[in-house]
């Protein structure tokens, strides 16, 4: 659990805003030609045409890096063709709406090899604007690659937004948390919600499902893109399809793992005189008669997490929850200890007895 910090929240919130604004502008730039290509597939009419010429076009762009100017040559396929619409002959050079240019001429050469001069081809044109035409329908691999590359950045943006919302809500819970009040159910910041049960009390910790799935989706898509690039499969449509399905499947698996592992349930059963904490497939119990004190401290040396746990008269301990260190963590953990102590009818161990890190 990430605890809110007065300096962390504006940083994360500002970064989330700037990141999403940049992604919106970049996505619009990428999506417009994609949408036009999709509309061509839906509405354009087919006719026959003839290729006049096919060559690798080039454009020299001046760029600047580390204070040094240099020129880079970018290549693209240039295919000239003509077709008849009624009694009118129309000439065009558009292959698709994708205007990608590459520093290597390999991709452009592969495209023009399919369109030798004099070849009869199918031309798809807009009936309302016959001069608007393409030679291929569907999304070319370069467009699919761009759409795939956007995914991890959008996943990162969504993760930042969810994290910001999490920090805002958590800060609000911290301000409102009063362990002395008798309001039940109540939310214990950084842990879960306290409810009454038929036999006593229960604290249920809900897993952070959306935040975890967005984080995993970001990591899996980023790694997938890197693997495709390393294997030279950046323009393979089949590889992109496999990547999309695999990333989605891994995110769902991550959600299942989070549901299984991240949730927990603390039960105080006054009829059985038992305190039980259930995590994943493991349940630990301690008899209420055995509990001597409710403690706050570090269970292990060099641990960075502040723990809330029960201690028996014989020195046995039962960890209830771990709060990550943060600006308000110590105060919240001690308040939670007071609330648990009231429920169990046990004393809170004196602060002087808190085990310090490294002891």
Image (spheres, grey):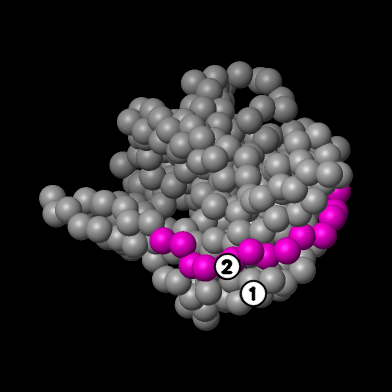
Q: In this view, does 235 lie above or below 265?
A: below
Q: In this view, does 52 lie above or below 202?
A: below
The disc, 1 or 2, on the residue closer to the chain's N-terminal end is 2
Residue 15 spot, x, y in % from top left: 41, 36
Q: Look at the numbered discs 1 and 2 and tell me whether their residues touch, using CB distance below 8 Å.
A: yes
Q: In this view, does 128 lie to the left or right of 90?
A: right
Residue 71 spot, x, y in % from top left: 25, 58
Q: Is residue 109 left or right of residue 117?
A: left
> Where does label 2 land, which residue?
54
SS at mark 1 in the image = loop
Which stretch appears magenta?
Answer: 45-58
| Quadrant into which the C terminus falls | bottom left
Name the residue rendered at 64%, 71% in the picture.
117
Q: How far apart are marks 1 and 2 (CA)?
A: 6 Å
Residue 35 lies in what quarter of the image? Answer: top right
> Where does label 1 land, which residue?
116
How would you classify the magenta stretch by its main secondary structure? strand
Asked whether residue 352 is in view, the answer is yes
Q: Quick one: label 2, few (<14), some, or many (20+) residues within 10 Å?
A: many
Residue 313 spot, x, y in % from top left: 51, 56
């Amino acid at each position: 659990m990430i605890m809110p910090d007065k300096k962390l929240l504006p940083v994360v919130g500002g970064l989330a805003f700037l990141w999403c604004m940049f992604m919106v502008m970049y996505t619009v730039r990428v999506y417009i030609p994609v949408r036009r290509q999709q509309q061509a597939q839906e509405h354009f009419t087919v006719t026959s045409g003839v290729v006049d010429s096919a060559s690798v076009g080039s454009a020299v762009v001046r760029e600047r890096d580390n204070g040094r100017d240099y020129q880079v040559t970018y290549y693209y396929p240039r295919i000239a063709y003509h077709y008849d619409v009624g009694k009118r002959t129309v000439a065009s050079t558009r292959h698709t709406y994708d205007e990608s240019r590459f520093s290597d001429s390999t991709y452009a050469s592969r495209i023009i090899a399919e369109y030798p001069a004099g070849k009869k081809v199918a031309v798809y044109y807009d009936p309302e604007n016959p001069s608007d035409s393409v030679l291929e329908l569907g999304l070319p691999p370069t467009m699919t690659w761009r759409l795939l590359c956007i995914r991890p950045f959008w996943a990162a943006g969504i993760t930042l937004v969810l994290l910001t919302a999490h920090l805002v809500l958590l800060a609000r819970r911290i301000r409102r948390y009063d362990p002395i009040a008798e309001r039940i159910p109540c939310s214990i910041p950084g842990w879960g919600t306290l409810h009454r049960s038929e036999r006593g009390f229960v604290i249920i910790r809900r897993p952070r499902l959306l935040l975890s799935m967005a984080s995993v989706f970001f990591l899996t898509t980023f790694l997938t893109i890197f693997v495709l690039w390393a294997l030279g499969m950046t323009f393979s449509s089949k590889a992109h399809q496999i990547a999309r399905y695999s990333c989605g499947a891994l995110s769902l698996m991550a959600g299942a793992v989070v549901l299984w592992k991240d949730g927990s349930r603390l039960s105080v059963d006054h009829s059985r005189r038992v305190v039980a904490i259930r995590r994943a497939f493991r349940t630990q119990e301690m008899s209420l008669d055995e509990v001597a004190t409710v403690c706050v401290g570090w269970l292990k040396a060099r641990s960075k997490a502040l723990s809330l746990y029960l201690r028996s008269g014989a020195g046995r301990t039962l960890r209830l929850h771990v709060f990550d260190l943060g600006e308000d963590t110590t105060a919240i953990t001690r308040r939670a200890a007071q609330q648990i102590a009231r429920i169990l009818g046990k004393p809170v161990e004196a602060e002087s007895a808190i085990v310090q890190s490294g002891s």
